[in-house]
Image (spheres, rainbow, N blue to C red):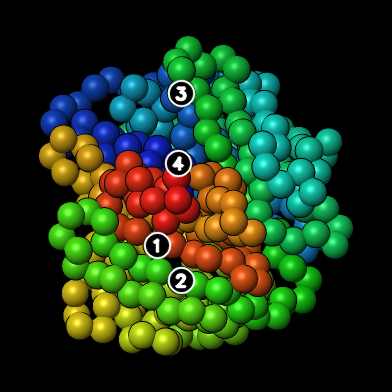
Amino acid sequence: MANKNLFKKIASVAMAGALTLSMALPVGAATNDPNLVVEANTLYSTPIASGSSVTLGLMPGNAYYQRTGFNSPEDAASSLTATVALGADKVDESSITYGSMKTTDYNGAETYAGTVTVSGKDGAYGPASLHVVNKNGTGDYAYIDMTVYVEAAETKDAVNVADVQVVDVSGTGLIAEEEENLSVAAATKNTANPFNGSNGAAQSYPTVGDTLYSMAEATGLSFTQSDGYVNSVTDSDGNTLEAYTTKDWTYYGWNYCVVRNGEKVDEGDILSAAVLEVEKDDIVYWAFGTMDQATDYFNTQMGK
């Protein structure tokens, strides 16, 4: 379904932007700030080369999700704890290490972020979710769920999915496309695939995101994406549905759900489509609307 991290990302960007435009507040590092956010150069979904490791930068954020930072490098190195919430067969939790790095806060002043370094397991590939907590944070949201994905040592073969549907459930019914028995290849196999070479998108194995490119080849639709998240879809008639947020902060966007052997793939609630591996005979639903509208649609399709 809709990736929960995406909604936190949207909230943090929107709130930070709103505050910046409306008022100026004193800025300073605050180890105990209520939110945990990514350092400016860290992606929400980060690749790990086969047999290698990756370092993530994370830092406190104020009530508006603006980056503030830790009070000291010692705080930065000692405040974070990370557990593998999903994909323990992909990454080695016992090898996670912590440190600190210099960075800047939202106002450009020097501050500190904590670092989390995680390694992929030998011979493994695919996504994992890390639940990272600032144990010194004071709010209910002093945590963040980060995605890392291990690229395969060799590109995996294409798979045939049973069905892909791309529909508008927001109330306008603008787009409705469906194709059965589609071949889905890894992003690296098709230079025209918008996920090819993109940040936040697995390259070496077929993903749920890549089903949209298979739909594009079959039906003539097109789509745009950013850092592995789908922004817009345009059907062959030129109808476009693009993600947006209303004045009351209601988010409308592209949500997905994968059904495998008659059951929803729960990892879709956490991971972006561009890193979740798609398998033979999967059914993939793409729905434009709010998270609740998409959830209702997916449940209806599954007979719930």
Q: Earlier in the sequence, mark 2 or mark 1?
A: 2
Q: Mark 3 points at which residue?
A: 141
Q: Name the residue under label 1.
A: 286
- Separation of marks 3 and 4 at Cα, in angstroms: 13 Å
- Separation of marks 3 and 2 at Cα, in angstroms: 35 Å
Mark number, residue 16:
none
Q: Which amino acid does label 3 sit on?
A: Tyr
Q: Which amino acid does label 1 sit on?
A: Trp
Q: Mark 2 points at which residue?
A: 164
Of marks 4 and 2, the one in the foreground:
2
Quarter of the image holding residue 177?
Answer: bottom left
- Separation of marks 1 and 3 at Cα, in angstroms: 29 Å
Q: Position of residue 242 (x, y in %)?
A: 24, 62
Q: Is residue 200 above or below residue 303?
A: below
Of marks 1 and 3, the one in the foreground:
1
- Separation of marks 4 and 1 at Cα, in angstroms: 16 Å
Q: Which amino acid does label 4 sit on?
A: Lys
Element under label 1? strand
Element under label 2? strand
Q: Which of marks 4 and 2 is nearer the N terminus?
A: 4
Residue lying at 58% horizontally and 46% vertically, measured from the top left: 266
Element under label 3? loop
Residue lying at 63% horizontally and 43% vertically, measured from the top left: 129
Mark number, residue 4:
4
Q: What residue type is labelled 2?
A: Val
Q: Which of marks 4 and 1 is nearer the N terminus?
A: 4
Q: Is residue 15 left or right of residue 116?
A: left
Q: Is residue 40 left or right of residue 127?
A: left
In which quadrant is the C terminus drawn? top left
Near-viewer residue (132 or 84): 84
Q: Position of residue 210 (x, y in %)?
A: 51, 72
- Separation of marks 4 and 2 at Cα, in angstroms: 22 Å
